Image (cartoon, rainbow, N blue to C red):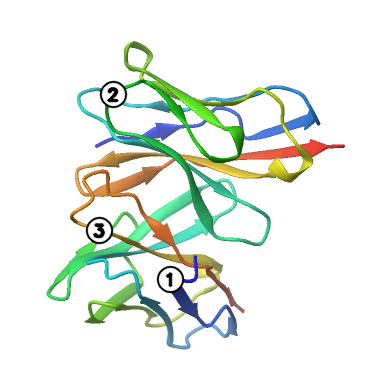
């Protein structure tokens, strides 16, 4: 079965800093990959997803992620973070009929 | 997402009590899921259902049961609650016709078992 690793558990940045959150999945083949965001006190919302085609995926709020098949990775990036990006970020991979989630990365952005 | 609702939003109960968490959706999706979220552990799948007659165990189904009363309703029960079931519980839905299986989440139920 698939598994997902998020190596950064807690990231602290200042506004305008660049962000990259790591995500690795366990094995190859055709994969569907997702990044979800959970703002404080809210439910999970889809940021972006990859299922085929261009490996660079653009999402909402200026986020993007790059699928690198050779590295089994799907890292999330944003060139300049804002205080409102403070949230928990979850990477997920589709495994047959289910989603497997990583343990999440908590991002704190300070003004 | 207002299309997926969960009741109650918060619940405090005592060890040994039976409790039911309810999920309703107006998205018309056929697939529904129950997850629990614990700090540092992410989301773990408890049960999922692909239609009214289909129920499947997830990663951590022990101590839980579910009922799919209709396409739009999926309930999670804790038969005899214990303190380590204190967690945030999320319901989610997805559409079989959408090949990527994007899931849409409800607002969550915060459950505390004393």
What's the residue at 55%, 27% (across, down)? A7
Which residue bears the numbered disc 1? B3
How packed mark 3 is, by other alpha carbons closer than 10 Å (few <14, some 14-19, many 20 or more), is some
Which residue bears the numbered disc 3? B95
Residue A13: quarter of image? top right
Outermost top residue = A70
- Pointer 3 chain: B
Lower sequence index among marks 1 and 3: 1
As drawn, B28 above or below A10: below
Q: Where residue B52 sits: x, y (%)?
A: 16, 76
Relative to A63, B30 lies left or right = left
Q: Are marks 3 and 2 on the same chain?
A: no
* Residue A53 numbered mark, or none: 2
Q: Secondary structure at mark 2?
A: loop
What's the residue at 32%, 54% (across, down)? B59
Outermost bottom residue = B17
Q: Where residue A25 sits: x, y (%)?
A: 36, 28
Relative to A97, A111 lies left or right = right
Q: A64 or B111: which is nearer to us?
A: A64
Q: Secondary structure at mark 1?
A: loop
Residue A51: quarter of image? top left
């Amino acid at each position: 079965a698939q598994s997902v690793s998020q190596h950064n558990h807690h990231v602290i940045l200042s506004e305008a800093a660049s962000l990259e959150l790591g995500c690795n999945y366990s094995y190859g083949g055709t994969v569907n990959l997702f990044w979800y965001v959970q703002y404080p006190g809210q439910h999970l919302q889809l940021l972006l997803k990859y299922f085929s085609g261009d490996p660079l995926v653009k999402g909402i709020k200026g986020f993007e992620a790059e699928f690198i098949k050779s590295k089994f990775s799907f890292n999330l990036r944003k060139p300049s973070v804002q205080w409102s990006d403070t949230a928990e970020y979850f990477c997920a991979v589709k495994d047959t009929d289910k989603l497997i989630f990583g343990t999440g990365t908590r991002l704190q952005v300070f003004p | 997402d207002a299309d997926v609702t969960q009741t109650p939003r918060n619940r405090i109960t005592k060890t040994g009590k039976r409790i039911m968490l309810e999920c309703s959706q107006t998205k018309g999706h056929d697939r529904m899921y129950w997850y629990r979220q614990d700090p540092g552990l992410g989301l773990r799948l408890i049960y999922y259902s692909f239609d009214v007659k289909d129920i499947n165990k997830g990663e951590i189904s022990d101590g839980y049961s579910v009922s799919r009363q209709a396409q739009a309703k999926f309930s999670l029960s804790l038969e005899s609650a214990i303190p380590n079931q204190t967690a945030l519980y999320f319901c989610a839905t997805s559409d079989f016709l959408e090949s990527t299986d994007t899931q849409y989440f409800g607002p969550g139920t915060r459950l505390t078992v004393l």
